[in-house]
Amino acid sequence: MNKNKKDLVVKDNALINASYYLSLTEQRLILLAIIQARAEKMTSSNEFKVQVSSYINAFGVERSTAYEALQKAVDTLINRRFSYYRIVNDQQEKVTTNWVQSVAYATNESYIKIQFTDAVMPLITQLEKHFTSYQLEQVKDLSSIYAIRLYELMMQWRSSGKTQQIPIDELRYKLGIEPDQYKQMVNFKTKVLDFAIDQINEHTDIKASYEQHKEGRSITGFTFTFKPKQKPKAKVDEVSRDEATGDLFSIGGLSDAQFARVARNKQFIADYNHMVSPNSSANSDINEWVREMVKQLKAKPEQFSKRPIEEYLN
């Protein structure tokens, strides 16, 4: 993908700081629609067409799975909402609104149509100040929904390379994490922050870290620090699973202890965190996560082909 204005994601900071949950496919679809909206500069119907081929090319997914994922996103996106704050007559208001008025998909699997709500359009097209922009290229390889959101939040502070201290409740709010999710700090740090930071560091143009702030023994907030990478990200050719390389992904012969070790590996969790439902107990309990992943590794090893399984044992 060429790094040009066509691939620029631009959002009002009110939207960057909004609270919402979107699946990975929904987030990606919204990003493409935002780019399309700014390119077409349409405000009358608020409807934009996203080609399935654009989704496939932008995010490097297989066509056989792309449309199925997009169909599911279409079915769920119509009910997705977000909340943000605005100032009206010197008064702060909290606004809750749907992302879209309607969503349609072509039965020949060629495109998706998204009609944004009236509340969304000014936040993605009528931007004069207090907005954040970044190249779609930077988030295309992120599979963690929290990595995408955290990258966006950090991009607001691009000029300083350091965010303000973000209280824990505010950070959870912005990441769209429900009160019953990741209630234990160890799970929040391990399954949300650490995964997101690892992916951001591997796949984007910045190197990021965080500092936790405490009152007594309790963690009350986080500050994120980041800087541009010194050298362009090295592109490593992906190895596909075929007759010549199938043995790289073989998991036969692993002991139960090795399966558990793979499932606990940070990179493994970052690669496959999307495979469990957001409401699953595996998202809040590392032991449940290990049990679920070991079960899937044994039952459907072909799902785990992002990298040689041996890498997760290092």
Image (spheres, rainbow, N blue to C red):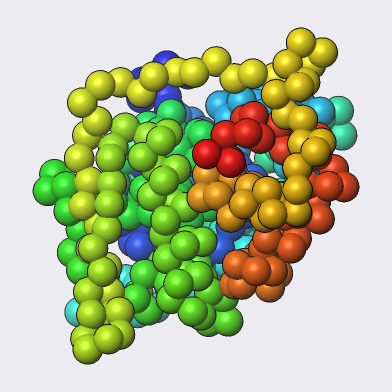
Q: How many marks?
A: 0
Is residue 64 or residue 306 the one in the foreground?
306
Question: Looking at the picture, does residue 32 appear above or below residue 226?
Answer: above
Percent position (x, y) of residue 300?
85, 43
Question: Looking at the picture, does residue 23 appear above or below residue 173?
Answer: above
Question: Looking at the picture, does residue 198 appear above or below residue 228?
Answer: below
Is residue 42 or residue 75 the one in the foreground?
75
Is residue 116 or residue 34 the one in the foreground?
34
The quadrant in which residue 304 appears is top right
Percent position (x, y) of residue 275?
70, 52
Would residue 222 be visible to someone looking at this image?
yes
Q: Tell whether 189 sits left or right of 239.
A: left
The residue sitting at 72% across, 29% down in the picture is 249
The quadrant in which residue 202 appears is top left
Question: Looking at the picture, does residue 233 appear above or below residue 67?
Answer: above
The residue sitting at 68% across, 61% down in the picture is 290
